[in-house]
Each structure stands twice: as structure tokens, then as C-alpha cells.
Image: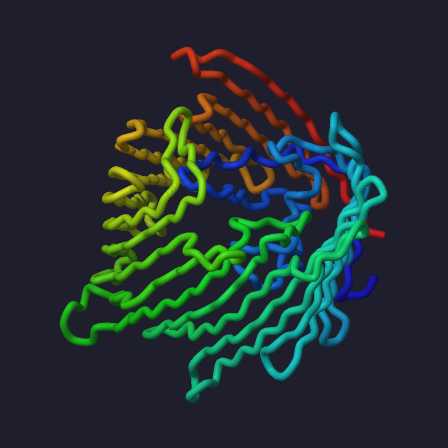
Amino acid sequence: ITPTLRLNLTFNTDFAQVEADRQQINLTRFPLFFPERREFFLEGQDYFDMGMGNTIIPFYSRRIGLAEDRSTVPIIAGARLLGKVKNATIGAMSLQTASRDSIPSNNYTVLSWRQDVLKQSTIGVLSANKYENGRLHSTSGAYTRFSTSSLFGSKNLNIGASYTQNFNSDGFDANANAQRLYLSYPNDQVEFDMSWQRSANTYNPEVGFLRRDNFQEYYIELEFRPRPKNRFKWIRQFSFKALDMNYYTYDNTGEMQSFFYEIRPLGFDTRSGEFIEFNLQIRAENLLEPFEITDGVVIPMGEYWFNRMEIQASSFRGRPWSIAGKTSWGDFFTGQSTTMEYSFTWRASRFIKLNANYEKYWVDLPEGRFDTDLVGSRIEYAVNPNLFGSLFSQWNNEDKQAILNFRLHWIPIIGADFYFIVNQVYGTSLNRWELERTTIVGKLIWRFVI
């Protein structure tokens, strides 16, 4: 439309070329967050961010074209407008999905306007809307952020506030809202952060995501990162965390919901690119009802406090090979648990890269003992800059499924993409692999500039 304003139109949209979601193990009572992987929604994602963090997300693009079980819902057509007009950043998107099984056809429309003020600050508004069977739901709000990089001469400071409210055509609830206030002092040798946020008991952003609901959170963190000058020359920077606390309460009762407290007696980055840290943690969960943590293992309602320790380390990722890992152990509800998470990357040549990851959880409770495994691997290869592919596999013993994804991407000319994808799902519940589903897709994308 203009050099700084772009309009995209899409018809019969599909995302067959998108790689499968990374599997996750969930031993909490809260839903898992899966990041957006579809290119259409990743482009301009920041235009629709209100700065409310990862717990309250007023607009979550995975609500469009995906069901709750992450299966595909067809998108009939859509339009997207992104860009800048003078000091204003504008985002608008509207898509119509088709009906599928018991899921009705819906329209999703999100509008965003952000105005630059002062030197580095902004104010903005956002409205995420869903129209379904004659009913309109809207989550709308405003936000502001004051930023400076010249505090005390050269220090950074960010202060922000956000507010969102639900509006429904079938009734208005003045209490269905969420807010966030935050202050961040992110600097090289000292970092200080604090925030407060709230999601009311009846707040429900139908085009958004809530990691938890009916809560208030109080958060504070203080970290010191001195740089040694004479001694410890092989260390680039230390990391000492004096305070890292999240305190959650149930918004409707004021009772504790969750608690997390961490200190870091020692952590450091080396000049060669490695890092290691050791953390001490206190955690708590207040269960108002029994919690089934895995099949057949139910934790009784009550208040539980855990003491845990954690070690994290990583080698320099710029080398041909690198390894990273995290291990934690200690109390867990009524018993004990140990977790291990490791990943290994090897750049065998400029044409091929291999990655493997493994997560293991051992849980020992009076209510039952169990362990979980999550294994993943990925091979990336490139014949040349215009022809490359990947082979991705993952398995976990909770779902008892192995997923294989083969993806070939060819760029015949600039503006065109051809994908060849093979997806396979194997059941492993009978201690052997049984092929459940195979999907083979070829897709050609040809872009036109009008």
C-alpha cells in the first residue's frame, strides 16, 4: 500500500509445511503453552503484544485455525495489514475459519494501534475479537511503556502498565478483567525487576491464553553480575541472584495459590562461552481439590512446600558441537522427584546439523511412583541455499506415541517455495511400534506483488 504499510491476503490457507509441535511433559495443574510456529502468524507477532508477559496473553494466534487438541481447523480466507504511519504502528488481522465436526465457523479479528511518544516510549490499544454463531466476544485493552537508556547517564529503565477487559454480546461482567504493572532495570552488572499482575476469576480471553486463572502475582528479582578484573581472568561475568520470588494468590479468596523463591549462590559465564549456575529453591502449591498428576496417581488437596536444588550448565554454542543440561532434585508434593534435561548439538559440516534432546523425570510419592521420558532428535541438511530439509522425531512415554516429520524445502526462484512433507505417527503402547497414521503433502507457494 505504502513503503511502510503492507497488506496481505490469504485464501484457503493451510500450514502443511509447518513442523510438528515439540512435545512437553506436564507435571503441573496448569495448561501447557505451545509457541506459534506458523509463518503467517509469526510475521508481525510483536504488533499484537500488550506486554503482559507469558501468563496472561490477550491475543494468542494459535486460537485461529487450531482446535484445543492442536488439530487443524480450515481457514477460508483472511487479510492482514501491518506497518507504520508516521509515529504510529498499526496491526490489523481478520480471518474466517470453516466449520469442522462440532466446531462452528468463526471469525477472528484483532486490531492494534501503538503510538511512539517521547524518545523510547509507547502507548497503545488492542482488541481481539471472536464472532461465533451470532455471539461476539471481545478482549480489549490499553497499555503503556516508558523506557529510557539514559538513566543515571547510561542505565536502562522500563516501566509499564496494561489493562484488558472482556466484552460479550450476551452479557457484560465488569469484573472480567486483567491488569499488569511492572518495573524493569535491565543492566549489565545489576538487574532488578518487579511486577504485579491479576486475572479475575471470571476473566476469559477467548482469543488469548491464560497459563493460570483467578490469581494475583507478586514478582521481584534482584541479580548481580560483576565482571572480574584481575583474578579469575577466565571468567567473563559472575551471576549472583539474591532474590527471585513469585507469590501467587487466588484472586477471589486471597489464599496462597503457588509460591516460588530462588537464590543463586554462584553462577558464571566463561570467556570461552561456557556457563554454569547453581540454584536453591523453595516452592509451594496450595491444592483446593485433589490433583491427578498422572494416570492413577492422585495428590490430596492441601498445602505443600518443597525444598529443591538445581544445576544448569552449557558449553559454547558457537563450536561445531555443544551440550547443555539441567538437573534438579528435592521435595515434590508428598514425596521426592529428580529431573534431568539434556541436549546435544553437532554441526557435522556446513551442510548438516544434528540435534538430540532427552528429558527424564523420576517421581516417588506415597500415592504412587512413576517416571516420564521425552526423547527428540533433529537432522537438518542443506544441498545448497535453495534446497534443504529436515528429519524430526520425538517420543514420550506419557502419550505412548512416536512422531516422525520429514520436510523438504526447495526455492526454485525468489518468491516461490515448494514443500514436500511426510508425517508419521506410531503407537508404542504395546512395547512395539505400530503405524497409526501417515500423511504425505506436496505444497507450492507462489507469491504475487500487486
Between 211 and 351, the residue placed more toward the observer is 211
What is the number of callouts on the image? Answer: 0
The answer to whether residue 387 shows anywhere in this view is yes
Between 21 and 333, the residue placed more toward the observer is 333
Residue 230 sits above or below residue 325 on the image: below
Between 63 and 356, the residue placed more toward the observer is 63
Task: Give percent across and percent down for residue 321.
Answer: 32, 43
Residue 248 sits above or below residue 401 on the image: below
Quarter holding the N terminus is: bottom right
* Apparent side of residue 420 relative to residue 429 in the rendered image (left or right): right
Task: Give percent across and percent down for residue 341.
Answer: 32, 40
Q: Residue at x 14, y 72 (%)?
A: 231
Task: Give percent across and percent down for residue 202.
Answer: 63, 52
Residue 188 sits above or below residue 407 on the image: below
* Apparent side of residue 168 relative to residue 343 in the rendered image (left or right): right
Q: How is the image coloured?
A: rainbow
Single out the residue that lies furthest toward the bottom. 153
Q: Where is residue 342, by image quadrant?
A: top left
Q: Residue at x 44, y 21 (%)?
A: 400
Q: Where is residue 71, by image quadrant?
A: top right
Single out the residue that lies furthest toward the left. 231
Q: Residue at x 75, y 59 (%)?
A: 111
* Apparent side of residue 80 relative to residue 312 in the rendered image (left or right): right
* Apparent side of residue 401 relative to residue 264 in the rendered image (left or right): right
Task: Give percent across and percent down for residue 74.
Answer: 75, 33
Q: Residue at x 42, y 41 (%)?
A: 28
Between 85 and 258, the residue placed more toward the observer is 258
The answer to whether residue 54 shows anywhere in this view is no
